Amino acid sequence: MTSSIPRRLRRTFLKAIVAVLPGAAVAQLTDPGFEQGGAGWVLACPELTWLAPSTAPHGGSMAMALQATSTDYPYCPSVDPQGGWTPAPNFYQPLPQVVAGDVVRFKFLARLEEGVPQPSGSAILPYAITVDAEGDMHFPVTDLTLGGGNPLATWESFPGQVTVPELPAGHLFAIGFGAHTFGGGNGVVHFDNVAVLVEGSGARLNAKAWLDGAFVPGTNLMRDDLRVAGLIPTTLPTYTNAMMGPNAPAGTGIGMDPAVLTVAGNNAIVDWVWVELRFGTPGFTNASSGFETVAKRYALIQRDGDIVDLDGSSSVLLPIKAGNCRVVMRHKNHLGVMSAEPLGLNATATLFDARAASTPLFALAAPHTGPARKTVGSTRTLWAGDAWTLNAPHGVLYTGQGNDRDAILIAIGGNTPTHVVAGYHRADINLNGEVKYTGEDNDRDIILHTIGGTVPTAVRYEQVP
């Protein structure tokens, strides 16, 4: 392998970049799951790289396949009609806004699908490259291999990262992928679920949701009783699980200007919420190579469902520069939801509207299935009733160990069911500023409705892994 690919590739690749990345507007990958016909990806050798049906868990319908051999440079007629070599990597994608000094992390799934004869091993090779104005590929660091490994017949998750070097004038930074087999055999290697994250700050999220406990059907608004009663804290201490739940971001001194809570009307604040960013593929749970939470960020939710930053109006600023991440939205006593697929996050606020029935959300496998949201007419709300933290897997329970109904009884003192406690409590399921076990507008009945209303032993599972 040389430090620069020969110029026989020249203008072919530049034309392909222009065709698949008009405007070159964002830094994260286009079509990381390959469901859009491979849009955004440049195939260095179409004869040896193609789209194939995906068998990856949570991988959608398509994967990228490539022919790997023990020969360093197998014959590729479209690149060199005379034969003799094929450039590596076999497919790649530029990240136009990445600049020198950026730390680029990536994860992807790969597996050896078949081999005739069966190779003795295979190497998965992600590369950092640059593409010049004539479409030639170059390795900014000689033979720089990022992560990689030796997949067998099952899908494996591979991580890697690189600090972007100084780029020559006119060059674009890119991430590419190839493979190599050993022992004289050939093999077809599949890639899927490619995710890229650029560390830093500056990505924005335009998130929207309804909290069912405060939602008023027919009005497309939530009640802001906590704000009106002056109960919403302006500064969050390090809350215990009993108040905000085990998933809440830790930290002290997180706060808002008290003036934010003086705003009335549709943009009035209902309560604190937070968002999480998940990087990688569900089911691959090792933090370094699989699914991981890379960031958590407190925010505020308004009566009209908008989730805004702590200034009360801006889209939520995320602690990454750009990336492909699944987004989780949470509230202290409502079940969270997660986007079904990674969202392309960058400086232009990306929409994630959990109110819309058309927004796909992640779903767990049996036996912990169930709708991620509650259907209320034509809209969707987050399930209410998550007042406790001891049940696993996470969900809303009316009876049994760690049930949420008992949390309400404990909050009011545990002895007198008719007792009412005012204040800012996790057991205040309907967010009206009072914890009630019986009587009108009590919090216990909401839990029963959330689990289905007829079988008290039923469980409403949160659809977030």
Image (cartoon, helix red, strand yellow):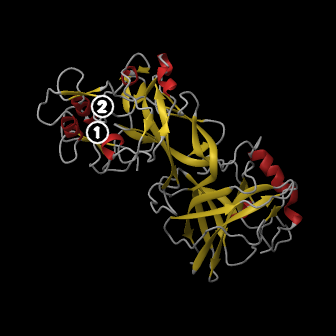
Q: Is residue 92 above or below residue 461?
A: below
Q: Residue at x 48, y 20 (%)?
A: 262
Quarter of the figure with residue 419: top left
Disc 1 is placed on an element classified as loop
Determine contact: label 1, label 2, CB under 8 Å: yes
Q: Check disc 1 and report the residue beneath it.
A: 387
Report the Cα–Cα distance between label 1 and label 2. 7 Å
| Percent of width and height locating residue 219 | 42, 16
User: Could you classify mark 1 by the number of other residues whose Cα lies within 10 Å: few (under 14), some (14-19), or many (20 or more)?
Assistant: many
Q: Relative to 387, is 304 on the left or the right?
A: right
Q: Residue at x 60, y 57 (%)?
A: 52
Task: Check the image and name the residue furthest to the left.
Answer: 415
In the rendered view of the protein, which quadrant contains the N terminus? Answer: bottom right
Residue 429 tag number: 2
Q: Is residue 2 visible?
A: yes
Give the residue type that dot 1 points to. Answer: Ala
Q: Is residue 367 above or below residue 8?
A: above
Q: Nearer the viewer, residue 271 or 330?
A: 271
| Percent of width and height locating residue 412 | 19, 33
Q: Nearer the viewer, residue 322 or 415?
A: 415
Give the residue type that dot 2 points to. Answer: Ile
Q: Is residue 239 above or below residue 189?
A: above
Q: Nearer the viewer, residue 336 or 432?
A: 432
Q: Is residue 134 above or below residue 398?
A: below
